[in-house]
Amino acid sequence: MLPRQATLIILAAIASNLPARAGCQPKIKITPTVATAEKGKVFEILVRVETDKRLESVAILPTAPENFCIRASAMPGLSGYRANTDGSAFLQALTAGSAVTFQFRVAAPTELQRSRGSCWTLERTAADSVRDRTSDNTRDNRQFVFNAQYRTVGAGTDTASSLWSETVEVKYTTSQWIFVGAGLLGVFLGYVVKSLTARKKEADTAKDVSATRRGQLGRLLEYVFLTSIDKLLTSLVLGFGGLLALSKAGIPVGGAGAAIAIGISLGVLADDALISKVK
């Protein structure tokens, strides 16, 4: 029993010496409104602060990845709140037992804009409308850092300043129309491959009509793109519908390369019998 009692005494002593404010830290939760950020699109990141103690001088300072722009949204009617020009948010006081959600708007760079261009998307100022090719890739996720500074007010007049930091990761992908366009290119390539393999007998027949190599190539192209134009157009339409539905559900990470691979699969695996029924 002695070792157990000694352990309890030690734990009680440690607990009594912990800072009083350790259990009074506010709850801060960061939630992106999208699972995947598209190039050229604006999305939101929500920062919810919930506290059991009164907080004063609450400042949320976000840091965006390169070529992204982040700005705190205005909240009219919330006393003591301001959205600063540097993108941060400030709240004069948050009473005990209350909560507030800060809203940050994030602009992802387009194909032709760097960070100043994405800020222009949010601010609409001519001074920030510089355009340039961006070197952004969609292989890596983007990390947004949020730092918070606040003062916790105790039962008396004592206050304690605290710092808090957390990182949230957002997947980054290409824009919807680039995804669909690259996917249609893949559908076209898949259709050509299928036409020259699955329907090889018909292709060879069309090719053998002419004796010269140039004539054979011409007849082969005529068969693929003219004689079977109905199958090509139907494959493209079906592929467009599939790619568009997939992009609405969420564009896969990987950019145009992933779109082409998906398109090739759609073009190759398209069932001729199904296409004939669609016609």
Image: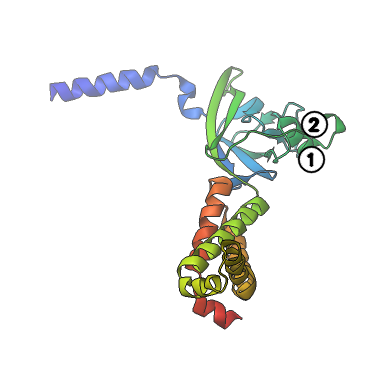
Q: Position of residue 209 (x, y in %)?
A: 56, 74
As drawn, 66 above or below 101: above
- Residue found 60% across the figure and 62% down from its top: 214
Contact, mark 2 vs mark 1 (Cβ under 8 Å): no
As drawn, 220 above or below 123: below
Question: Is label 2 or label 1 in front?
Answer: 2
- Residue found 63% across the figure and 30% down from its top: 64
Quarter of the image where one finds residue 60: top right
Q: Amino acid at mark 2?
A: Val
Q: Which tag, 2 or 1, sits closer to the chain's start?
A: 1
Q: Residues within 10 Å of mark 2 (few under 14, many from 20)?
A: some
Q: Which residue is mark 2?
A: 130
Q: Position of residue 30 (x, y in %)?
A: 56, 38
Q: Amino acid at mark 1?
A: Pro
Along the line of sight, the residue nearer the viewer: 153 or 140:
140
Quarter of the image where one finds residue 225: bottom right
Q: Residues within 10 Å of mark 1 (few under 14, many from 20)?
A: few
SS category of the residue bearing label 2:
loop
Along the line of sight, the residue nearer the viewer: 105 or 52:
105
Residue at far left of view: 1
As drawn, 139 above or below 218: above
**The N terminus sits in image quarter:** top left
Q: Position of residue 220 (x, y in %)?
A: 57, 67
Q: How far is mark 2 from mark 1, CA to CA?
A: 31 Å
Q: Is residue 80 visible?
A: no
- Residue found 55% across the figure and 53% down from its top: 260
Q: Which residue is mark 1?
A: 76
SS category of the residue bearing label 1:
loop
